[in-house]
Image (tube, rainbow, N blue to C red):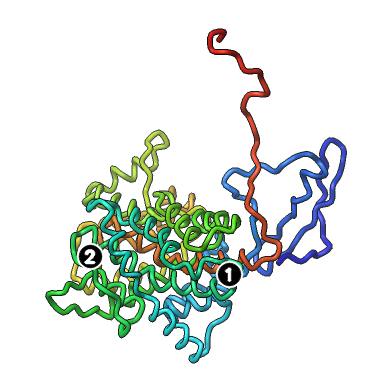
């Protein structure tokens, strides 16, 4: 909740001045409150893409793009990725503080005991075409949860909000894994309570009834890091979508489904899939100069995917963690000499040394490395965004809960700069 600091900014419009309150952030830029602007001046602000507009105040995640810093509730992302694990991070995002052992054990138990899906949902999966994209399935299934779990859709009830939150965190690995299994024609694998969160997801994806499957701990740790690094990222497009949907008092499952749909866009959650497709298109180190030249040509629409970021103006802090994780996974699966990896390594070197890329802050981002890691694990590119949605679900829920519990929350209603025709009279068709 914002606190008036007593500081103001003066805006003059047509000779008339208005004092606008300034609010200080605990970390980062202050904001100018323009809510009274239209009332006093008859003008709106104009900010396509909301690049300079704070639509809410939040205590969850902070990004400093210039410093390359990402904090979850104040904790640096590299510390959490290295020393914590995903469910502990989930607790942190949802409740604001790191748990003691008793609270963590209780939280993990509640998540573990909600991982199964309603059995009738198997029929819902079978209604999709066999070649449906996993993200199409995940979007539909998440939205359908409200048809199966009526006891956690009343957003005015704190207990129902809590139950819905646990259910979403618990069931997303099963939803995503079953979307993968359905897409490759294999039977669904049910969750196992004896496995941790990441290992359970991998078991549901890669095990089959005909033989035993042991999850490699290095792979499970890499997956856990991917989940942690993608858990939340402030007010990005999909998070803003969840908040906007939630502002209408839509049920939580519908709000998360809206976030999943937004995440599917290649400019957002599909970036790691696009990055790997680009590496495969390049194919060999010998072709890199050709594609670098195209990237530098302003008249060529080609762009290097997985480089640069809308927010980070230096190295993406998540990319540093994923870089090491990529090395560990690739060493494990024995693809050190894989041509795609060679292309990735050479592109990374160029991006960090070439003046063109350095000047424009086009450093490798987390999508660049996560696509390589997921591919090495055995996931097809079509699953990359579904895994991203799985990881981001807890962030969406934390943001949704924060918005619902904010007494100043109002339904989202952006304004516009209208540039169409002025009022005109209708003309009958025979007189046009």
Chain-order first, disc 2 or disc 1: 1
Identify which residue is drawn at 68% across, 69% down.
26
Farthest right residue in view: 16
**Screen quadrant of the N terminus:** bottom right
Q: Is residue 345 visible?
A: no
Left or right: 393, with 204 as reference point? right
Identify which residue is drawn at 63% across, 24% down.
421
* 158, above or below 266, in the image: below
Left or right: 143, with 175 as reference point? right
The residue nearer to you, when weighing 309 against 402, is 402
Which circle marks residue 60 in the picture? 1
Examine the image and state in which quarter residue 235 appears: bottom right
Left or right: 150, with 20 as reference point? left
Q: Is residue 333 visible?
A: yes
Tag 2 secondary structure: loop
Farthest left residue in view: 210
Q: Residues within 10 Å of mark 1 (few under 14, many from 20)?
A: many
The residue nearer to you, when weighing 234 against 350, is 234
What residue would you read off at disc 2? Answer: 378
Identify which residue is drawn at 54% across, 12% down.
429
Farthest bottom residue in view: 102
């Amino acid at each position: 909740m914002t606190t008036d600091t007593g500081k103001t900014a003066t805006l003059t419009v047509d000779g008339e001045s208005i004092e606008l309150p300034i609010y200080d952030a605990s970390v980062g830029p202050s904001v100018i409150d323009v809510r009274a602007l239209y009332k006093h001046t008859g003008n709106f602000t104009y900010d396509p893409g909301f690049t300079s507009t704070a639509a809410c105040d939040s205590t969850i995640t902070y990004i400093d793009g210039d410093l390359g810093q990402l904090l979850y509730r104040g904790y640096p992302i590299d510390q959490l990725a290295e020393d914590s694990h995903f469910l502990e991070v989930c607790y942190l995002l949802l409740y604001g503080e790191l748990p003691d052992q008793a609270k963590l054990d209780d939280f993990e138990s509640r998540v573990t005991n909600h991982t199964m899906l309603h059995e009738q949902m198997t029929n819902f999966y079978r209604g999709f075409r066999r070649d449906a994209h996993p993200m199409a399935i995940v979007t539909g299934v998440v939205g359908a949860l409200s048809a199966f779990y009526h006891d956690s859709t009343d957003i005015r009830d704190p207990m129902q909000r809590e139950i819905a939150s646990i259910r979403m965190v618990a069931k997303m690995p099963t939803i995503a894994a079953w979307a993968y299994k359905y897409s490759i024609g294999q039977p669904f694998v049910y969750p196992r309570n004896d496995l941790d969160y990441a290992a359970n997801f991998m078991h549901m994806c890669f095990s089959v009834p005909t033989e035993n499957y042991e999850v490699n701990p290095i792979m499970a740790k890499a997956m856990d890091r991917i989940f942690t690094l993608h858990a939340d990222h402030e007010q990005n497009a999909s998070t803003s979508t969840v908040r906007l949907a939630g502002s209408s008092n839509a049920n939580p499952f519908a709000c998360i489904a809206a976030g999943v749909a937004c995440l599917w866009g290649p400019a957002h959650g599909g970036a790691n899939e696009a990055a790997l497709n680009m590496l495969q298109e390049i194919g060999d180190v010998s072709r890199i100069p050709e594609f670098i030249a195209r990237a530098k040509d302003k008249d060529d629409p080609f762009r290097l995917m997985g480089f640069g970021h809308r927010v980070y103006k230096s190295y993406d802090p998540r990319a540093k963690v994923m870089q090491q994780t990529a090395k560990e996974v690739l060493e494990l699966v024995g693809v050190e000499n894989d041509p795609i990896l060679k292309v990735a390594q050479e592109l990374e070197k160029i991006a960090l040394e070439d003046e063109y890329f350095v000047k424009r802050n086009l450093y490798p981002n987390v999508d660049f490395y996560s696509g390589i890691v997921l591919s090495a694990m055995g996931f097809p590119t079509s699953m990359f965004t579904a895994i991203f949605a799985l990881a981001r679900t807890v962030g969406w829920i934390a943001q949704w809960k924060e918005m619902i519990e904010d007494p100043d929350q109002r339904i989202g209603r952006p304004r516009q700069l209208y540039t169409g025709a002025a009022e005109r009279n209708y003309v009958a068709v025979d007189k046009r």
